[in-house]
Amino acid sequence: MPAEAELSALVARSLRDVPDFPRPGVVFKDVTPLVADPAAFGAVVRGLAEPWREGGVDLVAGVEARGFVVGAALAHELGLGFVPVRKAGKLPGDTVEASYELEYGSATIEVHADALAAGQRVLLVDDVLATGGTALAAWDLLELVGGTVVEFGCVVELAFLGGRAALGERPVRSLHRVG
Ligand SMILES: O=P(O)(O)OC[C@H]1O[C@H](OP(=O)(O)OP(=O)(O)O)[C@H](O)[C@@H]1O
Ligand SMILES: Nc1ncnc2[nH]cnc12
């Protein structure tokens, strides 16, 4: 099996599907079993890091909360720093914020206004791409504070929810696609 297919299969068997969470009709893709398994977690982090090992990115950003788990590990793997994109009201400095809809609700996220130097190239990551609302809002915020986002990387893509299309021409990479 090619390496990409093997990694996709590993992700598939390391996730837990939780029906009707957090509300009826949603099948929640739970990554907690994956990140609790050092072999699976390591393979996922290496998979997301692979295109960037020779450079092209200055910082990794991740969206609270699950994006912190993937993003901080990935930043460490690449020898880079990490920029947190947080839910509203958590960052202590001056922030810029964006509100958005996601598969099962709405939210507001923030990034520190001084998180990036002008032109710094950012790899944005999260665990799940669903409608793309979160990814698009985070992408725009990171560019608003001066960065250039080079890719949105995620562990799982719920293709039937259209996140890739919502992100338009922005590069998206997922390790495992559902639907
Ligand atoms: O593509 P979307 O429809 O925007 O959905 C994807 C987002 O939803 C989840 O986060 P959630 O807001 O549930 O927060 P959490 O990480 O704190 O659980 C997930 O971690 C992504 O950030
Ligand atoms: N179905 C889902 N499972 C886990 N995280 C999500 N974020 C948005 N939709 C999700």
Image (cartoon, rainbow, N blue to C red):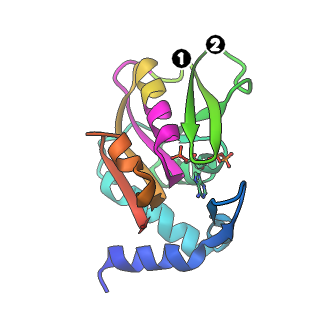
Residue 131: x, y in percent? 48, 47
Image vertical order of residue 124 relative to residue 127, above or below: above
* Dot 1 and dot 2 residues touching (CB under 8 Å): yes
Residue 133 colored magenta? yes
Task: Characterize the local packing of mark 1: few (<14), some (14-19) or many (20 or more) Cα atoms within 10 angstroms.
Answer: few
Q: Which residue does the image show at 70% across and 24% down from the upper left?
A: 91
From this viewpoint, is residue 83 visible?
no
Q: Quadrant of the C terminus?
A: bottom left
Q: Which of the marked residues, 1 or 2, is nearer the chain's N terminus?
A: 2
Residue 75: x, y in percent? 51, 47
Image quadrant where residue 112 sits: top right
Q: Which residue is mark 2?
A: 94
Is 24 situated left or right of 83 in this image?
A: right
* Residue 114's disc number: 1
* Residue 145's disc number: none
Q: Which residues are magenta?
A: 117-139
Q: Amino acid at mark 2?
A: Asp
Image quadrant where residue 3 sits: bottom left
Say which element carries label 1: loop
Q: Amino acid at mark 1?
A: Asp
Q: Disc 1 and disc 2: Cα gap in Å?
A: 8 Å
Extreme residue in the left direction: 169
